[in-house]
Amino acid sequence: MSTSLTTCEWKKVFYEKMEVAKPADSWELIIDPNLKPNELGPGWKQYLEQHASGRFHCSWCWHTWQSANVVILFHMHLDRAQRVGSVRMRVFKQLCYQCGTSRLDESSMLEENIEGLVDNLITSLREQCYDEDGGQYRIHVASRPDSGLHRSEFCEACQEGIVHWKPSEKLLEEDASYTDASKRKAQGIFVYNFFSFRWCLFWGVLCLVIIYLQFFRGRSSFL
């Protein structure tokens, strides 16, 4: 998927979802490659997506690679009186580590990934611009850090001081909840197995054998 198609897809998904989320307001999405983190004008809000999934294609050596650490920066502003809002967006690029060229390459994304990222954007937008409960953010498998090390020297976001390849607190809490649930489930299975019919039958037979041996031994001593 080319860059132009990716940009058009972002706008298409954003406008469709905003028409459903806030039909009374008019919103626009602007791609701004010069957007800087934490540099906000009056009334502007920021949302940072730190673990998006994208595919990169080197325009020099044609090497392609997948990354689950694509950083996307959003700046949002809503004019409540005019009911007009604006979102500025920047997708940070990466360098090709295969050929070592100094040219930054842009990522392409699947439509399903874009839809999930736009859902997260709208959640943040509703919280920060409308003071609403936006609901839960969508956490994808692709949002988890890669199994390998993130090469920060080839990442544009890292070069601008954005530390993003470590798991966020939200992901750590999810992992901890999953681990606790797994432990409780395992303990429940153990308790269930311990008191199951087969175990009860086994322990009952064992007790009868012990009683019989004790009785037989006592009777032998008496004789």
Image: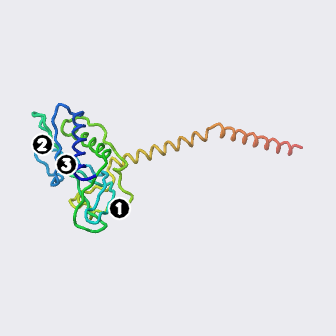
Residue designated by label 3: 89
CB of mark 2 within 8 Å of CB of mark 3? no
Is 205 situated left or right of 125 in this image?
A: right
Residue flagged by tag 3: what amino acid is it? Met
Which of label 2 and label 3 is nearer to you? Answer: 3
Where disc 3 sits, the SS reads: strand
149 up-or-down from 189: above or below: below
User: Badge 3, how many Cα within 10 Å: few under 14, some, many 20+?
Assistant: many
At a point 15% along the width and 39% down the height, the residue shown is 85
Q: CA distance from mark 2 to mark 3?
A: 16 Å
Is residue 193 shown left or right of residue 136?
Answer: right
Residue 188 horizontal side relative to residue 173, left or right: right
Provide the residue designation for mark 2. Answer: 43
Q: Position of residue 117 (x, y in %)?
A: 28, 45
Q: Residue furthest top?
A: 24
Tag 1's secondary structure? loop
Label 2 residue SS: loop
Quarter holding the C terminus is: top right
Reading the image, the residue beneath label 1 is 149
The residue positioned 19% from the left and 46% from the top of the image is 46
Which kind of residue does numbered mark 2 sit on?
Gly
**Pointer 3 or 1: first along the chain:** 3
Tell me what residue is drawn at x 79 percent, y 41 percent: 212
